[in-house]
Image (cartoon, rainbow, N blue to C red):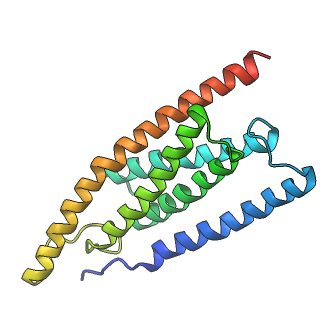
Amino acid sequence: MTHYMTQSGNNRALWLSFLAAILISAIYGLVVFWTKAIPPAGALFGHLLGILGFILMLLTEVLYSIRKRSNSARWGSMASWLQFHIFTGLVGPYMVLLHSSWKFNGLAGATTLLTILIVISGFIGRYIFTQIPRTLDGVEIATPSGQVQAAALARARRLMAAWHLIHIPIGMALFTAAFIHIGAALYYATLMR
């Protein structure tokens, strides 16, 4: 028996992301209230936001991609990993945005812009993804019944392929810029002192 993947799991990831963002914002607000200033990116709290946000973004990319490409892996369903991907793909960039101290200059600014673009692209990809019928485990259903449904499925598959051609290079550029930013920050802020 084939089951169609429901939206409740993905919506749960969105709600959890929203709740995490509220909690992070409350902590950020307390720091602003306590220090009477926007936390600098180079201060302890700013670094903590950047490091944790980047780790979440890295986990978003690496773990989900490995699980998605591994046919023999049995560690969690694809639906669960997609929820993880959505959660970390929203919370991590939000933390990195807060890390920026609302300054968007130079490489750090370009990295922040790429982060915003990848999140927007992710929302578009999520919409396209939901147009393709899948089982509860996230496996695409080969052919739905009816000629109209088959045409819609073919269109959604073409859109998903085109989306990958945009999303993946943005992600590669983002992580390249992020690693350069981290290397430069370590060099100039830590080793040059």
- Residue 134's spot in the image, x, y percent? 28, 72
Left or right: 107 as drawn, with respect to 121? right
Outermost top residue? 192
User: Which sits in the foreground, 104 or 42?
Assistant: 104
- Vertical relation: 48 (above or below) 154: above
Q: In which image quadrant can residue 193 be found?
A: top right
Q: Nearer the viewer, residue 7 or 44?
A: 44
Q: Residue at x 53, y 75 (%)?
A: 12
Q: Please identify the quadrant where the N terminus is shown.
A: bottom left
Task: Count numbered badges in the picture.
Answer: 0
Q: What percent of the width, then of the height, locates residue 118?
A: 45, 51
On screen, 142 above or below 47?
Answer: below
Q: Position of residue 51 (x, y in %)?
A: 67, 41
Direction from residue 140 to residue 101 in the image, left or right = right
Residue drawn at x 75%, y 22% is 190
Q: Pick whichever, 2 or 5, lies toward us.
A: 5
- Regarding residue 87, the answer to whether it shows in the image is yes
Mark yes or no: residue 70 visible.
no
Decide which of 21, 136 is in the foreground and name it.
21
Q: State left or right for residue 180 relative to residue 29.
A: left
- The residue at 76%/35% (across/down) is 42
Please give the name of the residue rendered at 74% of the width and 65% of the height, measured from the top-left corner: 23
Q: Is residue 188 left or right of residue 3?
A: right
